[in-house]
């Protein structure tokens, strides 16, 4: 087994109760890390049992990443309990899809509402900002750390009906590059992962014809698994990626190439 340097490190994963976040938390636990999952839902007992079974230690905390006070309090609790935060994975995100303006039969049928736009911005972009701002001062004081942000391949090439979502995922890429420049002098590495079409609970609810279209656009001919994104996060957090910062790693089965 390759030594990643993550044993006994403290990792915060937002949106950790399900999907990619849950897989990521479990993968860090397999490395012997101590994992604090932040989410607005989920079974804390089951989460903690899963982390222990994987070989690490874990706690699931009820944290709304759009609430600055809640984020700051959670960061203080984790740092106080485990002596600091070494890795932050900004994974939490939501979808509120809709066309900017849907025009049909000579008339406007619908528009993307302020609520649709603002809610996605609040979680997917402002949440990343709030969590990183809360965690970074402790990393600076301890001489380093790793921040990993969830972008998306649609943030690189756009996608129909996702003005709000894409604004956040493109914004995350921009923040990743800025923070890599600002924080590198403090020994903090900042990178982003851009998943392609991943088989999560959100996609499971979509019509089969939509899922088939996604698969057909992916050169490898299948959707990704949450565990495959988790592997990317663990590698970027590990000693093996010690000279990698400011990058966006696409884990997408080649979908950007095929676009």
Image (cartoon, grey):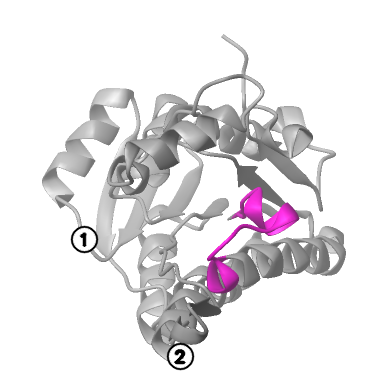
Q: Please name the residue shown 64% across and 62% down the image.
A: 139
Give the extent of the magenta segment: 150-165
- State the SS at label 1: loop
In the rendered image, residue 163, in percent from the top left (x then y), is placed at 59, 72
Residue at the far front in the pictured view: 105
117 to 247, vertically: above or below: below
Can see residue 231? Answer: no
Q: Residues within 10 Å of mark 1 (few under 14, many from 20)?
A: some
Q: Is residue 98 left or right of residue 240?
A: left
Q: Please name the residue shown 32% across and 43% down the image.
A: 207
236 to 108, vertically: above or below: above
In the rendered image, residue 36, in percent from the top left (x then y), is placed at 36, 52
> Tag on residue 114?
2
> Tag on residue 253?
none
Q: For the N terminus, give its image quadrant.
A: top right
Q: Is residue 248 left or right of residue 52?
A: right
In the rendered image, residue 94, in percent from the top left (x then y), is placed at 41, 64
> CA separation, marks 2 and 1?
25 Å
3 to 96, vertically: above or below: above
Magenta-span inclusion, residue 146: no
Q: Residues within 10 Å of mark 2 (few under 14, many from 20)?
A: few
Residue topped by disc 1: 41
Q: Is residue 53 left or right of residue 210?
A: left
Residue at the far top in the pictured view: 1
Can see residue 186? Answer: yes
Task: Please name whichever residue, 7 or 132, is drawn nearer the observer in this view of the structure.
Answer: 132
Q: Closer to the N terminus: mark 2 or mark 1? A: 1
Q: Quadrant of residue 151?
A: bottom right
Magenta-span inclusion, residue 161: yes
């Amino acid at each position: 087994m390759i030594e990643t340097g993550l044993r006994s490190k403290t990792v915060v994963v937002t949106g950790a109760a399900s999907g990619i976040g849950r897989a990521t938390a479990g993968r860090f636990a397999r490395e012997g890390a101590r994992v604090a999952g932040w989410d607005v839902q989920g079974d804390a007992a089951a989460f903690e049992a899963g982390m222990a079974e994987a070989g690490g230690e874990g706690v699931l905390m009820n944290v709304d990443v759009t609430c600055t006070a809640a984020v700051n309090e959670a960061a203080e609790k984790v740092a106080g309990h485990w002596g600091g935060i070494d890795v932050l994975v900004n994974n939490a995100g939501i979808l509120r899809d809709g066309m900017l303006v849907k025009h049909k039969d000579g008339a406007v049928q619908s528009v993307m509402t302020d609520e649709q736009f603002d809610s996605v911005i609040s979680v997917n972009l402002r949440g990343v900002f709030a969590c990183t701002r809360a965690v970074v001062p402790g990393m600076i004081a301890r001489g380093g750390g790793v921040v990993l942000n969830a972008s998306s391949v649609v943030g690189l090439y756009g996608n129909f009906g996702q003005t709000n979502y894409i604004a956040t995922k493109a914004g995350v890429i921009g923040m990743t590059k800025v923070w890599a420049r600002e924080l590198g002098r403090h020994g903090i590495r900042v990178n982003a992962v851009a998943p392609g079409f991943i088989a999560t609970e959100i996609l499971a609810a979509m019509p089969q014809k939509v899922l088939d279209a996604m698969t057909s656009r992916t050169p490898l001919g299948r959707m990704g698994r949450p565990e495959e994104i988790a592997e990317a996060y663990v590698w970027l957090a590990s000693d093996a990626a010690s000279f990698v910062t400011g990058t966006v790693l696409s884990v997408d089965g080649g979908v950007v190439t095929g676009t």
